[in-house]
Amino acid sequence: MEDVWIVDENNIWVVGQIVIPDPDSSWNGTGFETFNAAHWDGSYWNLSRFERGAPLNSIWYFSENDIWATGGVPIHWDGEKWSFYHLWNMGILDNNDGGVDHIWASSLSDVYFVGRKGSIVHYDGSTFTKMESGTDVDLIDIDGTPDGSKIFVSGYNYIGELAGKSVILELKDGTWERLLSSTGYFGDIENDDYGRYMSVKIFGDIAYFTTGATDLLKFNYKRRELAYIPKNTTILGGKQLESMDGNDFNDIMFVSPLDLVFHYNGSTYFQDEYIDETFPHELYYLKVRLKDDIAAVFGTTGVNGFIAIGHRN
């Protein structure tokens, strides 16, 4: 699984690559069936195939008749059919560009797709337009203000010639500018290098970034001020946070791949060990989503994927 979207407690979508045994397979009953989405209706998970059934990276849900997903290219559900937008064949991207894997939108006519090799594509409700990012680093997360006036993107390369390189991009007056950059996973905080930038989330005037060199980096984009929480000064303890999501600055959840789930209430951190105590497997957390009083956490056991849905009392 790669992404999850919470509509309400009886309407949750996950996307990725979902492989299950297929007992009816002609391959001696030992074959597999592949899906790229699953829907929780409050009682059961129902498996689905979006468009061609290829693995998906992200989902953005406006309504049951207006859903975007990505798997290197955008695909869209209009309530009747899926439309597949091959950005290279359309002349939007060229052979030097990478696919788009992540989505953020402020409205139906303001949708951003970001991905590999620094690729950024904007959709205005009718037309796709390539935007120059100024980087070849793979872009892995994006978030913006509700009106779309301020947007930040994080990027990091795990392998290849740019391995260890990381960036934060900021959209200013329609142009992407590099706000921060790093040359290694752990950075060099004394020289304003905050290491790997992963998750991005905006609350009010502040953009929050999970980094490799700090527990959390905060940027007040109106005052142009940076502040950070040093490692090992909170319960986060330098756990290399993989993902975060929240309702507001005093209601944020974090996950670390090191079997850890945290919640921040604006003043203190709480480590939630319920999932680890409930499931016997060693868990590797990848992403968290929080909407109102519903949280979804997913990751892998190393062999199988898992998703845990929680409700706040």
Image (tube, rainbow, N blue to C red):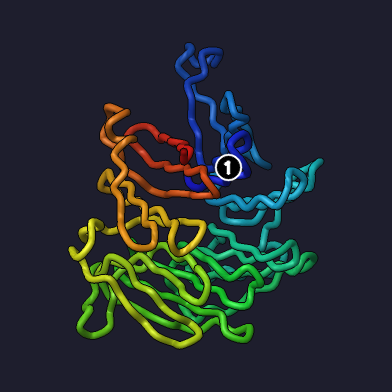
- Residue 27 x %, y %: 50, 16
The part of the image, by quadrant, that contains residue 10 is: top right
Residue 231 lies, with reference to residue 10, above or below; the image says below
Task: Tell me the crowding category of disc 1: few under 14, some 14 to 19, or many 20 or more residues within 10 angstroms, Cα based.
Answer: some
Residue 28 lies, with reference to residue 157, above or below; the image says above
User: Which one is nearer the viewer's eye here, 167 or 31?
Assistant: 167
On screen, residue 181 versus residue 96, left or right, reads left
- Residue drawn at x 34%, y 62% is 267
- Residue 116 x %, y %: 49, 64
- Residue drawn at x 48%, y 38% is 311
User: Which one is nearer the viewer's eye here, 93 or 137?
Assistant: 137
- State how many labels appear: 1
The part of the image, by quadrant, that contains residue 277 is: top left
- Residue drawn at x 54%, y 57% is 101
Residue 190 lies, with reference to residue 306, above or below; the image says below
Secondary structure, mark 1, is loop
User: Which one is nearer the viewer's eye here, 51 or 221?
Assistant: 221
On screen, residue 175 versus residue 195, left or right, reads right
On screen, residue 75 versus residue 199, left or right, reads right
- Residue drawn at x 48%, y 77% is 169
- Residue 48 x %, y %: 63, 33
Residue 21 lies, with reference to residue 161, above or below; the image says above
Q: Which residue is mark 1?
A: 54
- Residue 275 x %, y %: 34, 35
Q: Amino acid at mark 1?
A: Ala
The part of the image, by quadrant, that contains residue 232 is: bottom left
